[in-house]
Image (cartoon, rainbow, N blue to C red):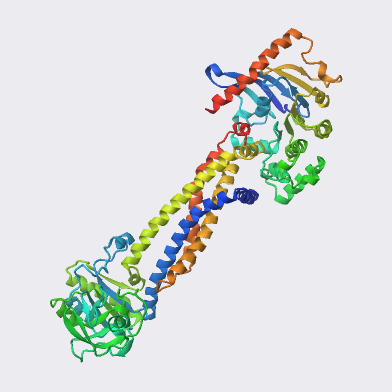
Amino acid sequence: MRFLLINHIQNARQSLKANHLRSVLTMLGVTIGVASVTAILALSSGASKVVSDQVDQLGGNIAVIRPGAATTDPLGNLIGQDTTAHDYSASTITEDDLSLVTAISNIQTIAPLMILSGPVKADSSAPTGTPIVATTPALASIAQLPIDKGQFLDPAVNQNTAVIGVQLSIDIYGTEDSVGRKIDIRGTSFTIIGVLKRLNNPINYNNVDFDKAVIINFDSGKLLNQSIAQIQQIDMRATSVANLDQVIIDTNKTLLLSHGGQTDFSVLSGTQISQPTSQLFYAIAGVTAVVAGISLLVGGIGIMNIMLVSVAERTREIGIRKALGATNSDITWQFLIESLAISIGGGISGYLIGYGAAFAISTFLTFNPVLNWQIAAVALGISLIMGTIFGLYPAFKASRKDPIDSLREYS
Amino acid sequence: MTKAPPVIELHDLKKRFGVGDAEHLALNGMELVIEKGEFITIMGPSGCGKTTLLNILGLLDQSTDGQYKLDGIEVSSFGSRRKAHIRSQQIGFVFQSFNLIARLSVIDNVALPLTYKGLTKTKRLKMASDMLTNFHLEEREYYMPYQLSGGQTQRVAIARALVNSPSIILADEPTGNLDSHSSHIIMEELSDLHKRGNTIIMVTHNPRLTSYASRVITMLDGKIDTDTLMPLIEPPAVTPKRPLGAKTRKKKTTTKKKPAAKKATPRKKKA
């Protein structure tokens, strides 16, 4: 059997070479499917790696509280049940929760994030969708927001002060230095006291692109929102990594009590934070995954089609081989290995092309695709499964052929 | 020889093609005992069931009725794997129409039966090369089948049948396409194998070749017509049904009908 395996592989190579164009075209179907799967996986794991890297950088003692129960269902994220959909839903986290959580021991700093939207104006109107983040000064240390010009929020200074992202500053004023200028947020005038350094990471666990955001005091934010605090997220930093677990447990207990036993919030830490990052990104990834699935199916049908043709063409050969002592399983393996050769060949080129595409796309994005063995294993696994599923029927069909009938056939 | 069971023993063997009106018995009650080491030529008009008989003997086809014992064991009890194993170990086929695999080189074609015996590649190629040398084809090893002349092709086909040194060789007109010189080489090779104790069953239309045989069987309408257990001394062209003029004519009419009937039936079977 061992010798035969080598023989089957040689055989497959020979027969694929003999029909060069046909084999290449069939492989192309698999290649496209595997390439899109690889690109999606590489990019999406690249995106989540960005966030988890940030969390690691921050020392691994960060936890966040988000409204809504945690969903582990990726489809749920796609449809929009995501806990971070901050634009429309009323948050279940209240100001009371904030003060309760603040009282928990072993928390070093804590900062609420209240994300509002609305017109931001100055000399020229800012791009729509500019996030207005109302928070406390502690955010600067938790999220490590570096200040380029001026200063960050400070309880000592006037309430109506704002810190803006560098890109927003350029968009509105045409300069990076806009400290001291007035900005109009939802009809209220704020003085800019600081400009952030360019962070260049739109994907982060706060779900805010700080380069384009305007940050105001929590109390001012409340005033803009009819004096109601609508907290989308609370960032917490434990005193040490070892204490983080205890902080999370305590937070869960406290909030559960105050919410009357309802788990309409979730406390996340570490890699959990990085899961649902960008709605849009996951929606695109989902659509592409469907396309990839369809092209894999089409590629598989292509394999089956070509294998059936190949079996029909080589009926006489099957008869000869059987007459010379090939068993049914020898014939099955011969054709199965041929279809596997097509699908694996397609899989490998798809893997390479997929990475090429991923790197090409990543030049337009702020993160790089991830190279790891899991993606290679998935690509190889997909092609193996395809070759088997779509190669089995033709192979069985070949092995069931009657030797006499096959020999009588002229080819 | 008396102790060992005969290599091949057929009893009331029947093979039916088609159904209903198209029914046709290619073999109609064959009785045949072949001992080890015999060299048998089977002659007879086309359509009398010679090829069908060879196919059944070679375990490629199954009889509809009757018994076929190979080495004393009834073959109808064998599974397809066992049959394939016997074909691989014991039986060598030489086909009427060469049946080389067109996309394999000459040496790969010859080495093919050894593949299914499970030999390593080097061993296979060595044995195939030796066999080709026997047939004076050593310079054609890496030719493709379409680059060979008819005679060379048939010699390759025979080399392939002999490469796994089978104990039974089934040859369907092995010299049908060869000039007398090539035929001579092949018949010498076959009779050499015969001398080494192999059993050879050869179908032929050429009465001259029966001189190599130890036993000549003529078939007619799926049955044995004549059978000489003695080796022939005289040139054989005399023996078959020549003198009976009236009878021959009658036969001729039947045989003329036969091919048409036979052609029609397989088509039915396929549909």
Residue A298: give x, y in percent of width and height.
Answer: 45, 50
Return the residue found at the far left.
A226
In depth, the one of A117 and B230 nearer the eye is A117
Residue at position x 74%, y 32% in the image: B169
Q: Is any part of residue A108 visible from this angle?
A: no
Residue A109 is at least partly visible in this image: yes
Residue at the farthest top position: B246
* Residue at position x 75%, y 20% in the image: B217
x, y percent for residue B137: 80, 42
Where on the picture, by quarter, is residue A227? bottom left
Q: Is residue A209 above or below residue B140?
A: below
Locate residue A179: give its quadrant: bottom left
Vertical comparison of A104 with A68: above or below: below
Tell me if residue A290 comes above or below residue B266 in the rendering. below
* Residue that sits furthest to the right in the current view: B233
How far across and down, in percent of the image, does residue A68 sit?
A: 24, 67
Number of on-image labels: 0
Image quarter of the N terminus of chain B = top right
Judging depth in this view, the residue of A120 and A328 nearest the camera is A120
